[in-house]
Amino acid sequence: MRPWPTSRLPNAARLFSSSAAARGHTSNIGKAPIKFPPTVTFAPSPTALSVTGPRGTTSVPLEPYMAIAFPAEDTLALSVQDAEQKKQRSMWGLTRTLINNAVVGMTEGFTVPVYLVGVGYRAALEEDPRGTTNGGSGMRLNMKLGFSHTVYEPVPAHIKAEVPSATKIVLSCTDKHLLGLFAAKVRKWRPPEPYKGKGVFVGSETIRIKAVKKK
């Protein structure tokens, strides 16, 4: 990272804090090194970084102004040409986060619980009669969510779903973004409501209960 040019600080004493001098010239997320286990390998190219681990292979896009370095055997560092440019600085932190998520996904994977809260709410995992068409896994979620009908949600091939209890669904995936999208799709059937606290809750999600005004 380039030091702050002294010519730009004609009166440094007028700054209210030292953080003001550094603002806009670095990314605290982007500059953080990424530790990875020996089971993970990387294959950088001018446009992408391929990450391979025990759970498979994924790719993270790279901008032309980004550079990958390995300061240690178990450490990856990402840098940009000019951190003073807002676009480069923002993409620096974003890409670093995507690379770190790829490392975690290819080694441990991501898991999120989904809770069904409400009288009569329950879920079960069953075979999907449509099979694996349209990218499905051949399984679907059978959910009772207070409607007059049963709700069916096909499980995509990249998602692993488990139902350890009638009111809890556990979703797993190697891609954090795709996992979040599917969890949000399940939640959309019955979003948590603030009066009785019923609905589909994802992860540690909570909701503040509103008091009902009496006339």
Image (cartoon, grey):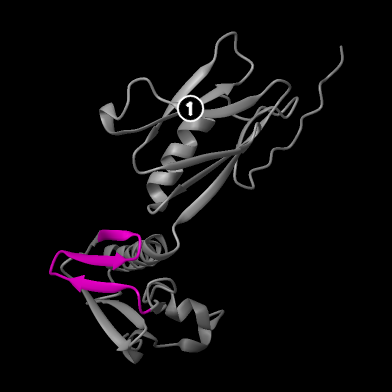
Label 1: which residue? 126
- Does 200 appear above or below 82? above
Q: Position of residue 108 (x, y in %)?
A: 45, 62
Q: Position of residue 125 (x, y in %)?
A: 51, 30
The residue located at (42%, 52%) in the rendering is 176
- 10 Å crowding of disc 1: few (<14), some (14-19), many (20+): few
Q: Quadrant of the C terminus?
A: top right
Q: Is residue 115 visible?
A: no
Instruction: Give the structural element (helix, strand or loop) at label 1.
Output: strand
Q: Quadrant of the N terminus?
A: bottom left
As for residue 132 lying within the magenta part, the answer is no
In the foreground, 189 or 126: 126
Q: Position of residue 7 (x, y in %)?
A: 32, 89
Going by the image, does 48 lie left or right of 187?
Answer: left
The residue located at (35%, 60%) in the rendering is 55
Give the amino acid type for the residue marked by disc 1 in the picture: Glu
The residue located at (48%, 77%) in the rendering is 20
In the foreground, 26 or 132: 132
The residue located at (36%, 83%) in the rendering is 75
Going by the image, does 177 lie left or right of 203?
Answer: left
- Does 11 appear above or below 141? below
Q: Position of residue 110 (x, y in %)?
A: 47, 55
Q: Is residue 55 visible?
A: yes
Q: Give the farthest residue toward the left.
A: 46
- Residue 128, quarter of picture: top left
State whether the magenta stretch is mostly helix, strand or loop. Answer: strand
Span shown in magenta:
38-59
